[in-house]
Amino acid sequence: VQLVESGGGLVQAGGSLRLSCAASGRTFSTYVMGWFRQAPGKEREFVAGIRSDSGRTYYADSVKDRFTISRDNAKNMVYLQMNSLKSVDAAVYYCAASSRIFSVSKRELDYEYWGQGTQVTVSS
């Protein structure tokens, strides 16, 4: 599985961005998908995840009620809608996929496929 993120960029605080992740492979619909982020000098952290059937979504407390993860299994796409962006949201955002788990995990080790990342910069 190859993952390619897009949609990052520079946005003012309070603004919105929509990240996209395009996945290759015919088994995309069976993967749990996640978004992680890594800010300079910090460890990579879980942001949001969605089960293969889109039935359940999970969010880090820091982004709950501001970010929305979704997926389109017909298009092999997963999205992260980010609203009310703050300076603390600035980071490289990574898309991740897992065939090993049924429910969303916040642990990096549970995801075996990763994209290259897309930079999100928030100006104050």
Image (tube, helix red, strand yellow):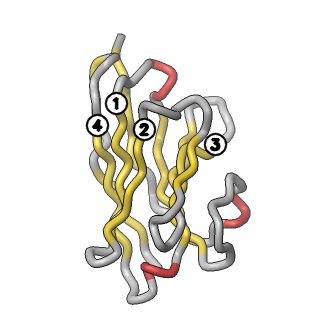
The Cα atoms of the two marked residues, 1 and 3, are separated by 18 Å
**Residue at the (38%, 35%) spot, across then down:** 120
Secondary structure at numbered mark 3 = strand
The quadrant the C terminus occupies is top left
Residue drawn 50% across the image and 72% down it: 52
The mark that comes first in sequence, 4 or 3, is 4
Dot 2 lies on which element? Answer: strand
Q: Look at the numbered discs 1 and 2 and tell me whether their residues touch, using CB distance below 8 Å.
A: yes
Residue at (40% x, 44% y) in the render: 68
For the residues marked 1 and 2, what is the alpha-carbon distance in whole angstroms? Answer: 6 Å
Between the residue at mark 4 and the residue at mark 1, the CA separation in whole angstroms equals: 7 Å
Which residue is under mark 3?
Answer: 45
> Residue under circle 2?
67
Pick whichever of labels 1 and 3 is earlier in the sequence: 3
> Which residue type does callout 2 highlight?
Phe
Q: Which residue is mark 1?
A: 83
On screen, residue 117 versus residue 96, left or right, reads left
